[in-house]
Image (cartoon, helix red, strand yellow):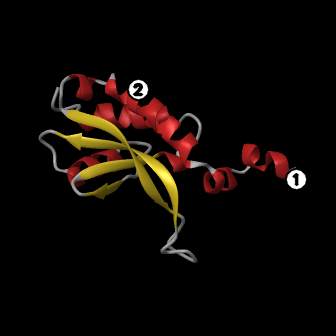
Amino acid sequence: LNADRLGEHHPTFRMLTAQQGDLLERAEGLRARLAESGPASRGIVSIGVEKAGDAVGAGSLPTVELPGAAVTLVAKDTEAGELARRLRAHRPPVFTTVHDHVVHVHVRTLQPGDDDVVAAAVESAWKDDA
C-alpha cells in the first residue's frame, strides 16, 4: 500500500479526494462530448456544467457534501424526472440527481470509461423521438 499512489488503485479514495477544479475540467470535457450528440444537435436537450455539492453518503455522513461538479441536462419537451428515469433505464444505468427541473450528472462518481456510458444513455433517452 503506497499512500502516494492510493488514488490510482482505490476508486473510493480517488472520489473522496478529487478537487473541484479537476472535476469541473472533467465535466467540461463530458459536456463538450454530449453537446455533439444527436439530442443536443437537434435542440432536444441543453447541456451545461455547474458547480455542485456531492453527497458523501447516506449512512454515516448523511449531511456532508464535497465541492463537486455536474453536467446539467435540460430537456426541451421531457420532464426532468422522466429524463432521469430514462437514463436509469439504460444498461448500464446512469444515476443522476434532479434539482429545480434540471438533471445533474455528478462527475465525481464516474469511473474511467463511464463517459461512453453516459453518452450512450443520453443518445438512447430519445431513441424513439428521432
Q: Is residue 72 above or below residue 32?
A: below
Q: Position of residue 115 (x, y in %)?
A: 48, 34
Q: Residue furthest bottom?
A: 60
- Give the class, few, some or many, for how many residues have Cα within 10 Å of label 2's Cα (few <14, many ≥20): some
Q: Which residue is mark 2?
A: 33
Q: Is residue 113 left or right of residue 5?
A: left
Q: Is residue 81 above or below residue 38?
A: below
> Which residue is nearer to you in this view: 91 or 30?
30
* Tag 2: amino acid: Arg
Residue displayed at 15% across by 44% down: 78
Say the numbered circle drawn on residue 1.
1
Residue displayed at 59% across by 37% down: 112
- Give the class, few, some or many, for how many residues have Cα within 10 Å of label 1's Cα (few <14, many ≥20): few
Do the CB atoms of the residues marked 1 and 2 lie less than 8 Å apart? no
Q: Is residue 106 left or right of residue 21?
A: left
> Which residue is nearer to you in this view: 122 or 2?
2
Asked whether residue 121 is in view, the answer is yes
Q: Secondary structure at mark 1?
A: loop
* Tag 1: amino acid: Leu
**Pointer 1 or 2: first along the chain:** 1
Q: Secondary structure at mark 2?
A: helix
Q: Quadrant of residue 41?
A: top left
| Quarter of the picture holding the C terminus | top left
Q: Residue furthest right?
A: 1
Q: CA distance from mark 1 to mark 2?
A: 36 Å
Residue displayed at 58% across by 77% down: 60
Asked whether residue 93 is in view, the answer is no
